[in-house]
Amino acid sequence: MIHHVFIIDARDTVVVQKKFWIINVDKEEIRRFAFRVKTNQMLLIEEIGSIKCIGQPLGRGVVILCAEFVDEDTTLMEKIEKVAFEFRRVISYEEEFDAFMRKLDTYVTTKLKISLLGHGGVGKTTILHLLNGGKMPQTYIPTIGVDIQKVERTRIGTYELLLWDFAGQERFRKLWKTLFSRCRIVFLVTDSTLENVLQSRDILDFLKEHDSLNAVVIIANKQDLPGALQPSIVQRLLGIKTFGLIAIDPNDRLKALDIIQKSLEREVDWTKMEIDTINFLP
């Protein structure tokens, strides 16, 4: 994720500074990096502390994007070129500065791939409908292969959400390992019954074999049904961070988005959030 954008002019004045995420950056380190970019008059990519910075000369100024290590260099180069091109239009008076700031979000947006795994009938497709604000399915129709949908009009930080709903039937599992590429979060969905929670251990074993356990979060769905196990119990049984959800309840949409946000930065103290990182786009 690109979490900061800076544009610094020839007098080392920060003329654009936008923060998209709750990660902090060292402003003095950014200024020193900007100086190296201007001195060399070439695009530079450096790791500064726990972040990755890419800088591009802009006349006698410089554009800087700060991102996570997982962001690919080629993608960052494409995005910084777009930001630089649009800002040149501003300084040539072809576009208003306020319009540039409004559009800056779209220049740095990245797709976040989220995979939904679980046995059939646990509510994976219903979660997808919940996030998109669509009508809930009244009957169970098994997913065939994989269903890919973008979560419309919603962004977390600079991430657009792209959900991959994987079929839970055994015959489709050979597809899973080939489709996990660049997946940032894996939601293992259960129906909160003891039987299904214990059955889900085989999926965890599969993920462990493919070194994907670090990205896994459990969603204990169907918390409204009698006898549903509490998320804390599911977490003890499976040993993975677990959140409860009622996917058929439209009121749980914000909760589902909050689960995604928490899953992105589990080490952050969410009680001390500096900014609202969920955007609902018009």
Image (cartoon, rainbow, N blue to C red):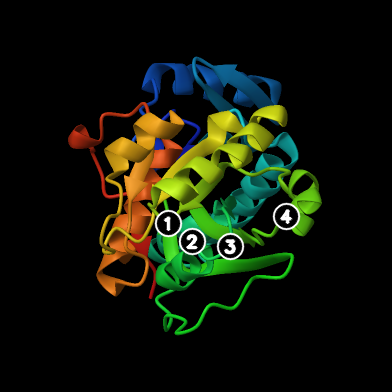
Q: Which residue is tagged 3?
A: 120
Q: Which mark is residue 170?
A: 4
Report the side of 62 relative to 261 (left or right).
right
Report the front residue among 241 and 182.
241
> Which type of secondary structure does the marked residue at label 4 adopt?
helix
Report the side of 188 relative to 13 (left or right).
right
Report the front residue among 80 and 197.
197
* Res. 41 image quadrant: top right
Q: Are marks 1 and 2 in contact (CB under 8 Å)?
A: yes
Report the side of 107 relative to 239 (left or right).
right
- In the rendered image, is residue 260 in sight? no
> Which type of secondary structure does the marked residue at label 2 adopt?
loop
User: Where does the image place residue 89, in percent across and percent down from the top left?
Assistant: 57, 61
Q: Amino acid at mark 2?
A: Val
Q: Earlier in the sequence, mark 2 or mark 4?
A: 2
Badge 4: how crowded within 10 Å, few (<14), some, or many (20+)? few
> Which type of secondary structure does the marked residue at label 3 adopt?
loop
Identify the residue at horizontal 36%, vertical 30% (top origin).
236
* Res. 55 image quadrant: top right
Q: Which residue is tagged 2?
A: 122
Q: Earlier in the sequence, mark 4 or mark 1?
A: 4
Between marks 1 and 2, how big is the CA–CA gap? 5 Å
Q: Amino acid at mark 3?
A: Gly
Q: Earlier in the sequence, mark 3 or mark 4?
A: 3
Q: Earlier in the sequence, mark 1 or mark 3?
A: 3
User: Where does the image place residue 101, in percent across and percent down from the top left?
Assistant: 41, 58
Badge 2: how crowded within 10 Å, few (<14), some, or many (20+)? many
Q: Is residue 96 above or below residue 211?
A: below
Q: Which residue is tagged 1?
A: 191
Between marks 2 and 3, how big is the CA–CA gap? 6 Å
Q: Amino acid at mark 1?
A: Asp
Q: Are marks 4 and 1 in contact (CB under 8 Å)?
A: no
